[in-house]
Image: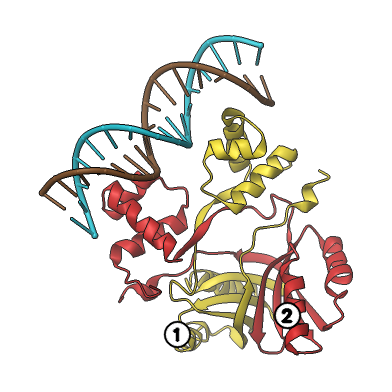
Chain colours: A red, B yellow, C brown, D cyan
Amino acid sequence: MPKTELDAVDRRILAALQADGRLSNVDLADRVGLSPSPCLRRVRRLEAAGLIGGYRALLGREAVGLGLTVFVGVKIGSHADQAAAEFEAAVVAMPEVIACHMVAGEADYLLEVAAPDLAAYQRFLLDRLLALAIVREVKSDIAIQALKQGAPLPLGHLDAG
Amino acid sequence: MPKTELDAVDRRILAALQADGRLSNVDLADRVGLSPSPCLRRVRRLEAAGLIGGYRALLGREAVGLGLTVFVGVKIGSHADQAAAEFEAAVVAMPEVIACHMVAGEADYLLEVAAPDLAAYQRFLLDRLLALAIVREVKSDIAIQALKQGAPLPLGHLDAG
DNA sequence: CGTGAAATAAAAGAGCC
DNA sequence: GGCTCTTTTATTTCACG
């Protein structure tokens, strides 16, 4: 059932868990105005339906020594299915690549790369990304300051569900 | 102490919690080869040091009805401190804006915006973003496909800590 | 700094309204 | 769909190596 109906309680559960993924079920229950059992059932249902995809600890990027974020626009030389698929597989397998989207715009792909510093990014760029023969052009936008990062998803559009 | 030394166990703790933020302390302990007590002490220390910034449930974007991701390059008309600060505050306060970085490149800022569909994005663009007088130019790169999104941070660079 | 054991508290699952 | 009660399991603290 891909289109499960969400009521106000479900939305509060999603918002609360998105703000604090380690909320205990009893705390969550009384925050959303339910007793623990039905609250847990709803959480399980949301997990099974894929609305909750998982739980994760958020690491401080500077604190773990990944102070540099770079957004990389990539143009590839061939859009033949197989060549593009190989590029995608290679890029997705690179741990430095935090995100990779195929985009409609000037570039073909937009990558977000996390690195300790410029030297490490240079190695990534020269030795790993440009090592892929299909890569035709690369444009690096270096993040000078992160004003907002990995913010919780907005759920306001569900309010008239 | 901003530069706490991390040993191999700390790194495994970070990796494990990043993969599953709801790991119980006993599971975490035996996954990293420790007994529960010292494991919990280390986790608390990592939290206090900011290496672990928090915990969050990850929501499925499609599943919660946010199927559209757009990367928006923004150029502003004035870089005077106050004008730029007002722009930043306004953008950071918009819930649709999942991420906002000041970048060195063609644009001044790069935004990641999550929206239910193109119509909603259009409303965001026209009514909210372009409503800011300081915004001079906007370039929208629409994500066609998310190959990787919000991936765990790579910790390999800590291995020779 | 690590281990092990005990008490407290929460989660998971039963049955019932 | 929600509530209460019971069993199981984790979290936390304390004493010890």
Q: Are marks 2 and 1 on the same chain?
A: no
Residue situated in front as seen by the camera: B86 or B39:
B39
**Where residue B152 sits: x, y (%)?**
65, 58
Residue type at the position of mark 2: Ala
Disc 2 sits on a residue from what chain? Answer: A
Residue that mark 1 sits on: B120
Q: Is residue B107 visible?
A: yes
**Where residue B2 sits: x, y (%)?**
70, 43
Q: Is residue B104 visible?
A: no
Label 1 environment density (alpha carbons within 10 Å; few <14, some 14–19, many ≥20): few
* Residue at point 51%, 58% (across, down): A54
Q: Are marks 2 and 1 in contact (CB under 8 Å)?
A: no
Q: CA distance from mark 2 to mark 1?
A: 31 Å
Against A112, is B13 above or below? above
Q: Quadrant of residue B145?
A: bottom right
Q: As drawn, is A157 to the left or to the right of B98? A: left
Residue type at the position of mark 1: Ala
* Residue at point 32%, 72% (across, down): A5
Disc 1 sits on a residue from what chain? Answer: B
**Where residue A3 sits: x, y (%)?**
37, 75
Residue that mark 2 sits on: A85
**Where residue B9 sits: x, y (%)?**
70, 38
Q: As drawn, is B40 to the left or to the right of B106? A: left
